[in-house]
Amino acid sequence: MLRRAAVLAVLSCYVTATPAVASPRQAPAGAPELRLAAASSPAAPPAARSAPQTPLSLSMTSISNRTIGPRSKLELSGTVVNRSIQPLAAVYYRLRYNPQHMVSRGRLAQVAQGDVTALPRFTEARPLGNLPASTTPVNWKISVPARSLGFSIFGSYAIGVEFYTQAGQPLAGQVTFAVWQPDGKKWFKETSIGWIWPLTDRMHRSGDRSFLDDRLETDLSPTGRLGGLVGAAQATRTPLTWAIDPALLDDAQTMAAPQGYVVRSPGREQTKKPSSTTAKDWLNRLRGASDHDPYFALPYADVDADALVRQRLSAHLKVAYEHMNAATSVMGRPPTDKVAWPLNGVAEAKTLGRMAELGSESFLMSSAVFQPGVNHTPSSPASMQTSAGTRSVVTYDATLSKIVSADTRDPADRLLVEQRFLAETAMITAEYPEIARTIVVAPSRRWNPDPAFAQNLLNWTDSASWLSPAHVDRIADTRPRETMTFTGYPSSYEAYELGRKYLAEVNKIAYRAARFSTILRPAGQPYERSVLRLESGTWRGSMARRARDTRDDLGRQIDGDISKVGLLRKGREVRLGGRTGKVPLTFSNELGNQDVHLRLEITSQVPARLQIGEYETDIKLSAGERLQINVELESYAQGPALMYVRLLSLDGKPFRREETLTVNATGYGSMALLITGGSLAVLFVGVGFRAIRARRRNKLEATGDGSPGGEPSWTQEPRAPFPP
């Protein structure tokens, strides 16, 4: 019931023909809630509409004829459930309707959000009997000849069903619509309708090697979200224009690779998965279903273009455009159109200009950000001025796009949305029947319709008497174009963009990855797509925490790869056994499948203590290879000295932190030898003088009394002691 209430809120949130722009969080703040049924009794005052919710839950699950005429029967059926703990006695129900056709889309929206009792006419009451307190649904059915309702001209008419007690107490009610098609020749011109079929999804990978989850395996299956969209297109012949995120195709192709893929959530152990037959089948079905349809590619990962331009990262947007070629590789043909579809159907003028400079020839934008120059629903084609010149604009109908984007997995929800779609399109045709117009419907990027609902929309586009299918690329080229004024990018939207701090950290990761990539051979930028996935617009809103975790995980992956190319040593000490010598340094490339080509630079902290001689500066390492390089060193002092080892790209820029090695010289340098030699010379001279003096003394002792220098001999009496 909560889901159905949400669907009804969507169907009732448009009270004007040109609604406000939908919130980037996909749920407009303050959208009016439409209660499931709390309809007033015929005699109840207007205040009864705000009465507490009644215990009866109503579901309308079937309408026999979606388009009725004089020879048709209008048959409605569904179920009710008494959710209270008390039985309900003498419950009645009846059809209510308004014989006056809807005169505008604004009026249609007002009726959709109103109570069923606002419809002035009703049929004879039918007894449902007593309803026990139970969760068991009770069936109901109403069938009346369509001609008895008094409908006259072609258009949309409000109908509904109400339930009440014998005393007139309202229990439940539901408003919906029917399209009346009288007999005779059509007096209106058909409305052409073009469909945008979005194939996008949130990001499932951080790096290229592993997935954050295995959700795509479910979504790509025939019963999954993405599989259902392709299946609906396969089952009809209605032309479509596909809007495809190349990152989604890239993910599916990676899953389908023969070697399989890896699933590893941040901080968890990885799980090896076999090659996905689901992904392979989905790609084959997509190619077949879209073979005759045009398609355009979104920038890779559907990046948040406004955030990138605002944070001066336009170069990243350019890279996202360059990687649109992933779609060509997987689809087997290039995009047929160069269309830019901004997030939420609107972008800053500066962003639109940048997109135009990068090659976008037209824009797909929401009608909600254009002020029409007419009082009816305008045709889709328009134009606008950008910094790169005039560009064509295809405006998609914001109201219809929001309506069909509602949750339709429940049969009752699906029926209400289908009837509202038919009523809206018939109203568009009827409000200005003399002029043929063209509209475009672009469901939300992550549209998750019931497959039968999506197929019905396409079938009615082809079969409804007031509609005719059209290709969006042809709509973009239509002349003349409507005169509409672009009202600008809503200021409130900036708060939903990827933030400055988040993107600053992403940019740091991108810089490290770009510097490291310059040494890889063959040359390339293997981390660019990983960085673009961090900048995807799908991270907006409630995905912020997961975005940060994914960003940090990619940063660790890149740092891990960088650490696999470098100096291979157990310690940081180098011993030099003499004044000069050669020290071996070993460099390794532990990357599994990538060769590298880099430059080596070694410097001394104090050249007066340690000089670096010749060594090989150009290093080429195959994957898994190790290379030993001998570095000539000359020490001028005993003791430790520092030298720095830097690994650089070929253009001389470092891609990782430098290594610091301590050189311990255990021998003597030239200065030390000079000092030592001088000291020995002084010592030898001193010893010589002492030897000569000793020889002289010995001669004197041999010719005299043996007293040296005329001094008294030790045999003489000693001197008197010091007086006491």
Image (cartoon, helix red, strand yellow):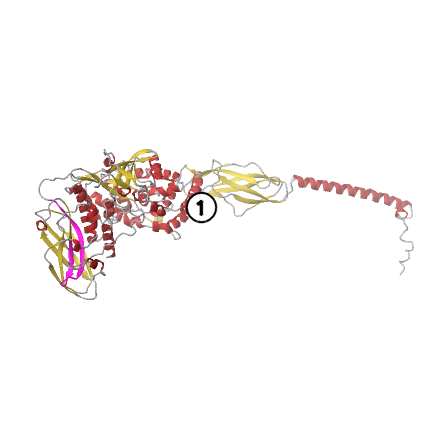
Question: How many residues crowd around disc 1 within 10 Å: few (fewer than 14), some, or many (20 or more)?
Answer: some
Tell me where residue 698 appears, x and y as whole percent: 86, 45
Q: Main secondary structure of the magenta part?
A: strand
The answer to which image quadrant residue 577 occupies is top right
Q: Is residue 545 above or below residue 582?
A: below
Q: Is residue 322 above or below residue 704?
A: above
Q: Quadrant of the C terminus?
A: bottom right
The answer to which image quadrant residue 306 occupies is top left
Which residue is denoted by mark 1 in the rendering? 559
Q: Nearer the viewer, residue 349 or 719?
A: 349
Tell me where residue 116 appears, x and y as whole percent: 17, 55
Residue 204 seen: no
The answer to which image quadrant residue 644 occupies is top right
Residue 92 is left or right of residue 355, and the answer is: left
Residue 710 is left or right of residue 639, and the answer is: right
Secondary element under disc 1, as helix, strand or loop, is helix
Q: Nearer the viewer, residue 173 or 416?
A: 173
Tell me where residue 4 appears, x and y as whole percent: 23, 54
Q: What is the total number of numbered labels drawn onto the structure image?
A: 1
| Magenta stretch holds residue 161 | yes
Q: Amino acid at mark 1?
A: Asp
Q: Nearer the viewer, residue 617 or 605?
A: 605
| Magenta stretch holds residue 603 | no
Residue 28 seen: yes
The boundaries of the magenta stretch are 160-181
Q: Quadrant of the N terminus?
A: bottom left
**Residue at left 83%, top 43%?**
693
Q: Residue furthest bottom?
A: 86
Tell me where residue 150 appears, x and y as whole percent: 9, 49
Q: Nearer the viewer, residue 34 or 574?
A: 34
